[in-house]
Structure formats: C-alpha cells, structure tokens
Image (cartoon, rainbow, N blue to C red):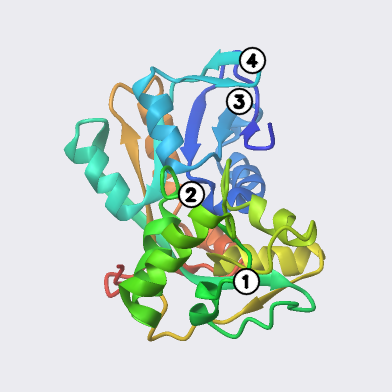
C-alpha cells in the first residue's frame, strides 16, 4: 500500500501520478498545501505505474489491492508527455498538457557492483542478473529499450527484454521500479536500469546502492506532464495543481532529486 496516500472519504483533490517520483510527492503535497490551505489534509494521491493508473481511470477510479477495493475518481493525471498527449487524444484527459520537468536514465547496482557492470552493453551478458521495469505498464521500459538500441542495437534490447526474460535472468517488476533497489539488496539481481532521480533518492536515503552512468549519446530523456481528467470531480483544484507543478517552489523540490526543469528546447525519445 506504499503507493496510496491520503483520505478517500471526502477529498478535495485526487491525483494520479506515475510512480517515477513517488519519493518527491510527500514534499510536493506539503508545499502545495502551504500555498493552498483549503486543501490541507484533503488531498488523495496514488503513485502506481502510468499504465495501471489508466486502467483505474477507465474503471471509473475503482482499484483493488489484495482483498481491498475502493474508488477514487481522479482530478489530474501526471506521466510522460507522450502518454499525456495520447490520453488527451483518446478523450480521457482534457488539454492542454502541462509539461514541467525532465529526467534521464542510469543503471542501479549494489554498492560493491558485484557484476562489474560498466555500461548498458553489460546488461546483455548472460551471467548478469537484471531487475527491469515491466513494459506492460511502465513507461520507463520504452525509454530503456531506446537506450539499449543506441548502445547495442536491437540485439541488445532483445537480449535484455526477451532472451533473458525467457531464461529468468531478467526479473520484471510487479509493481514498479521502486522494487529494483530491493531486488538488488536481496541479491536477486546485479543491475537494473532506472531513472537518474531514483538513484539520487536512494543515495540520499542511505541503502547500499550505487549507480553506473549512461553517457549522453546512449541516454534517453523523458518530459513529465500533467492534464485535467475529463469529467474531473474537482476541475478547479486540478487546475490549481497544474499551475503549481511548474512553479519555482515545486521545481526546487524536483531539482533536489536530480530532475531538470522543462524548457521548450527539451527533447525526448
């Protein structure tokens, strides 16, 4: 239940946030409540993967976790810009999309790097066990595949996401990439591709996790964006949140974890 926060009894604002910055949402909500005191204690948010959030949105806000089922109809949805634009095109969200921050990839490894991983090419080695985001519902998997192709062509991408999945040396996450450092610390894997910001968060939190940089020529950038959900119960509250998300106060919180502010010059794969 680590991805569900707040009181669903009578919220004034419900946020669906792709899990890429689950660790930043607490500070972001606290700072937002200081700016908009009417919402204090009345915000509910989720940080499960974007694809699962879409399924919940399509189900009218109903979700089941274990033996518990509840409904929280969303006001605003946050994910990668391409995903947000696609959902606007499908009529699930109301435009325009509001971009606010960018992020890049890195390779997360145990602190002593037992697999001696030096770059993306090493992820294709049969003896390197991997923990990788699930392409079925995690948008980051598309960016990772793009970077794998830059580093070693389709053969490397297939080795990581097909051959090694089939033989069990790539474990796919069941929730989202917050599981990657856990798998590394438990000894189930020697490496896993994640967002740069998540590796920075782990470094700040203190577990025995390190990272291997991916060079710019092989890296991939994502642009994060949000939009109002069509038929949102609290559309004005959603607009307040979207206005705040690219404010200097919000961007300072993002930058603390390694995100970069969005500019019109940002490009994504």
Q: Is residue 145 above or below residue 176?
A: below
Q: Is residue 196 above or below residue 7?
A: below
Name the residue rendered at 32%, 54% in the picture. Answer: 81
Q: Along the horizontal axis of the image, is 84 left or right of 65?
A: left
* Front of the two marks 1 and 3: 1
Q: CA distance from mark 1 to mark 3?
A: 46 Å
* Front of the two marks 3 and 4: 4
| Residue 188 x %, y % | 72, 57
Q: CA distance from mark 2 to mark 1?
A: 18 Å
Name the quadrant of the C terminus.
Answer: bottom left
Name the residue rendered at 53%, 53% in the picture. Answer: 20
Among numbered discs 1 and 3, the one appearing first in the sequence: 3
- Could you classify mark 4 by the number of other residues whose Cα lies within 10 Å: few (under 14), some (14-19), or many (20 or more)? few
- Could you classify mark 3 by the number of other residues whose Cα lies within 10 Å: few (under 14), some (14-19), or many (20 or more)? some
Residue topped by disc 3: 42
Among numbered discs 3 and 4, the one appearing first in the sequence: 3
| Badge 2 vs badge 1, beta-carbon distance below 8 Å | no
| Residue 185 x %, y % | 78, 60
Residue topped by disc 1: 128
* Front of the two marks 4 and 2: 2
Among numbered discs 1 and 4, the one appearing first in the sequence: 4
Among numbered discs 2 and 1, the one appearing first in the sequence: 1
- Residue 222 visible? The answer is no
Name the disc covering residue 134, or none. 2
- Residue 60 visible? The answer is yes
Q: Quadrant of residue 99?
A: bottom left
- Could you classify mark 1 by the number of other residues whose Cα lies within 10 Å: few (under 14), some (14-19), or many (20 or more)? some
Among numbered discs 4 and 2, the one appearing first in the sequence: 4
Name the quadrant of the N terminus.
Answer: top right
Q: Is residue 241 above or below residue 248?
A: above
């Amino acid at each position: 239940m680590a991805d569900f926060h707040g009181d669903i009894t009578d919220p004034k604002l419900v946020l669906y946030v792709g899990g890429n910055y689950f660790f930043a949402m607490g500070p972001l909500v606290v700072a937002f409540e200081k700016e908009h005191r009417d919402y204090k204690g009345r915000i509910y948010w989720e940080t499960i993967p974007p694809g699962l959030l879409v399924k919940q949105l399509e189900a009218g806000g109903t979700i089941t976790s274990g033996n518990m089922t509840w409904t929280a109809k969303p006001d605003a949805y946050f994910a990668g810009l391409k995903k947000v634009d696609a959902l606007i095109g499908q009529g699930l969200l109301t435009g325009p999309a509001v971009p606010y921050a960018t992020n890049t990839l890195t390779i997360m490894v145990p602190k002593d790097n037992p697999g001696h991983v030096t770059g993306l090419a090493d992820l294709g080695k049969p003896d390197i066990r991997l923990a990788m985001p699930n392409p079925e519902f995690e948008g980051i998997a598309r960016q990772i595949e793009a970077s794998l192709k830059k580093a070693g062509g389709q053969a490397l991408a297939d080795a990581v996401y097909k051959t090694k999945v089939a033989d069990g040396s790539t474990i796919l996450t069941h929730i989202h990439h917050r599981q990657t450092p856990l798998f590394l610390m438990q000894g189930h894997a020697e490496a896993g591709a994640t967002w740069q910001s998540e590796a920075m968060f782990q470094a700040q939190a203190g577990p025995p996790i390190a990272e291997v940089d991916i060079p710019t020529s092989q890296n991939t950038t994502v642009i994060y964006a949000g939009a109002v959900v069509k038929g949102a119960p609290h559309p004005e509250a959603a607009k307040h949140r979207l206005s705040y998300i690219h404010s200097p106060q919000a961007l300072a919180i993002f930058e603390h974890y390694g995100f970069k502010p969005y500019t019109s010059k940002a490009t994504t794969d």
